[in-house]
Amino acid sequence: MAYLYPWPRDFRQGVFKYRTTPFGSIPQDKDIYRTISRGVPGTAMPAWRGALSEDETWGVVEYIKKFSKRFEKEKPRKAITIGPAPASTPETVENGKKVYREMGCAQCHGTDLQGDGPIAHELYDIWDHRLFVYDLTDPNTYKFGFDKKDLFLILTTGIDGTPMKSYSHLTDEQRWDLASYIESKVRKEVFKPAQYELDLTAHRVDHEINMDPGDPMWENVPVQNIHMIPLNARRDPIDRIQFQSVVNDEGIGFRLEWEDSQPDRTSSRHQDFKDAVAMEFALGEVLLHDHGHNEPFFGMGNRGKVVNIWQWRADWQTEIETKEKLEYATKGLDLDTMIFGGEVNPVDALNPFRDVPVEEMNAEGFGTLTPQPQTKQNVEGKGVWKDGKWSVVFFRTLDSLNKWDIKFARKNPVLVAFAIWDGKHQDRNGRKVISMWQRLKPPHH
């Protein structure tokens, strides 16, 4: 829980943010069902629509209700009915802008709706958690939808437990006008529909797999977009990673690419934060959502369910490139006589053991991350930042060195998940963006 923001909901008070019921009422069962199925974009709560059956989801609804006595003592009030949304016109948008100004919405959401109002950093919810005011112009941050009907509903119900009160005291026309104004500011062209679980494919090639992310080989390999979930509130999060994979008789390669306007390549000082990416594989013949959901937790595994992790770091990449440049520049020179009578070669002092910017590790839950022995490290990698994007290639032989390596020769799909650390957001350890499990079809020799 300590790694997540917003914090997971405390169900004991029976206070739910998303409802179709009036402000102060407990939600209807279908409201809880909808949240479980759709997830909550912009938070660590994923959509479970494809993971749980209808019966399982209703079972979760009933279980959640048992945490609060309110569901024993109260009945949810009648759901708010919403008629057809009236068409937006320049006049309704202008009227909505006036309502936005008169209601003081800019105090929290800012005059430009980007969440930087004068009191935005002073807000707390009823659980005494500091609130993050999201950018209303970004469609990817809306937790409950940005369709005009969704906006009208939130303006009518409010968001229980937060300073976002109900505006049911306004007329329907005023709320529709306000919804029109907000909708007019949403940059719908940047919306990226969430696909949490994909079937990924490694494409067969007959040539050697080049470690260079810029190799022309990758131009002919299909790209799949994987949805990423931030584990803490942030502006402009990395919300997707582009995946490509190739396989030949010898090994398997993965190319991961994501947008990052600022390359953070060093963590030599305490205040520095570096960019990094990791692939996580579920060990064993586990099937996603089958056999009683026997797959490991997609965040670092859990006890008895080990995951194999490959991590590339930009600072390691920088160390290697610096070392190579120094070695080239001093080729043929006697470094020992140049550096104070033969003290430690500063090239080797960068990292005397590492010649690849990737480390292979295992984990079975938070706090259990363990590097594999140096002699068992079996993954290569290389990263390049260019034109506002990181491109990273991982490569491993199909043969594995020990029992803690993922076995690619198998019958069932390989479960794989991803994590990105963004230096400009001061990411480190559990502060990152992650994906859920994806299914990689077994590559054939």
Image (cartoon, helix red, strand yellow):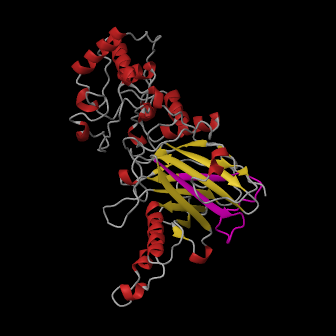
Task: From the top left corner, tell me how far across and down residue 204 is, in percent.
Answer: 74, 51
Q: Residue at x 66, y 51 (%)?
A: 217
Q: Is residue 296 left or right of residue 179?
A: right
Task: From the top left corner, tell me how far across and down residue 58 is, in percent.
Answer: 58, 34
Q: Residue furthest bottom?
A: 341
Q: Nearer the viewer, residue 7 or 197?
A: 197
Q: Residue at x 46, y 31 (%)?
A: 190
Q: Is residue 292 visible?
A: no
Placement of 24 over or under 443, stated as above or below: above
Judge whether residue 220 is colored magenta.
no
Placement of 340 over or under 267, stated as above or below: below
Task: From the top left corner, tell me how far across and down residue 425 is, in percent.
Answer: 36, 50
Q: Nearer the viewer, residue 314 or 226?
A: 314
Q: Is residue 289 left or right of residue 436?
A: right
Which range of residues does the magenta coloring cover?
389-418
Q: Is residue 254 visible?
A: yes
